[in-house]
Amino acid sequence: MPSKTNHFWISIIGIGSSIACALALFIASLGAAAGVVVSDESTQASTASSEEQTYEGLITDTRCGAKHQPAIARSAADCARVCVHGGAQFALIDGDKAYVLDGNLQLLKRIAGQRARIVGSLNGNTITVSSMASGE
């Protein structure tokens, strides 16, 4: 008789394990399907906000903004370049709005400290620059 009892418990454990695996697979499938729906919605939202627009303002850095320290005896362009070299990012200041610029650093360095027209897509407060022209 003991062999039938052992066989019964082994069968119960096997069936329970199979059900647990099937349930886990089902829950994972639901989670994956929900993830696809969420990513599709976020893709649509980012596509709507990623249309290219034109922005105009002063090209500076995120550390100093529009007010560079006169005590450093450098121009606004030199100050922005030094700050970016030190870890800040290029920024576009348009009145009371400030945008971080993501683009070609060499081109941004050339127009640092100047008013410029930037064409790019906005994501949050970051503009991904596709083209730029100096306003001077």
Image (cartoon, rainbow, N blue to C red):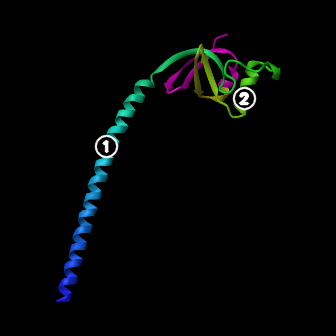
Residue beneath the point at 50% across and 27% down: 124
Membership of 122 in magenta stretch = yes
Q: Which residue lies under the disc numbered 1?
A: 34
- Disc sitting over residue 14 in the figure: none
Q: Is residue 38 above or below residue 100?
A: below
Residue 68: x, y in percent? 73, 20
- Which residue corresponds to the image point at 19% horizontal and 83% vertical from the top-left? 5
Q: Is 115 located above or below residue 17 in the figure?
A: above
Looking at the rendered structure, the kind of residue marked 2 is Cys
Q: Is residue 59 left or right of residue 8?
A: right
Helix or strand or loop: what does disc 1 sit on? Answer: helix
Q: SS at mark 2?
A: helix
Say above or below: 76 vs 29. Answer: above
Q: Nearer the viewer, residue 72 or 111?
A: 72
Q: Tell me what residue is drawn at x 32 percent, y 39 percent.
A: 37
Q: Position of residue 85 (x, y in %)?
A: 72, 32
Q: Which residue is mark 2?
A: 83
Q: Which region shows up in magenta?
A: 108-136
Of the residues shown, which amino acid type is indicated by label 1? Ala
Q: Are marks 1 and 2 in contact (CB under 8 Å)?
A: no
Please tell me in which quadrant of the rendered image residue 133 appears: top right
Toward the bottom, the furthest residue is 1
Q: How many marks?
A: 2
User: Relative to 37, is 84 on the left or the right?
Assistant: right
The main secondary structure of the magenta stretch is strand
Please tell me whether residue 81 belongs to the stretch shown in magenta. Answer: no
Counting residues from the start of the chain, the first of labels 1 and 2 encountered is: 1
Q: Residues within 10 Å of mark 2 (few under 14, many from 20)?
A: some
Quadrant, the N terminus: bottom left
State which quadrant residue 50 falls in. Answer: top left
Q: Give the residue drawn at x 23%, y 64%.
A: 19
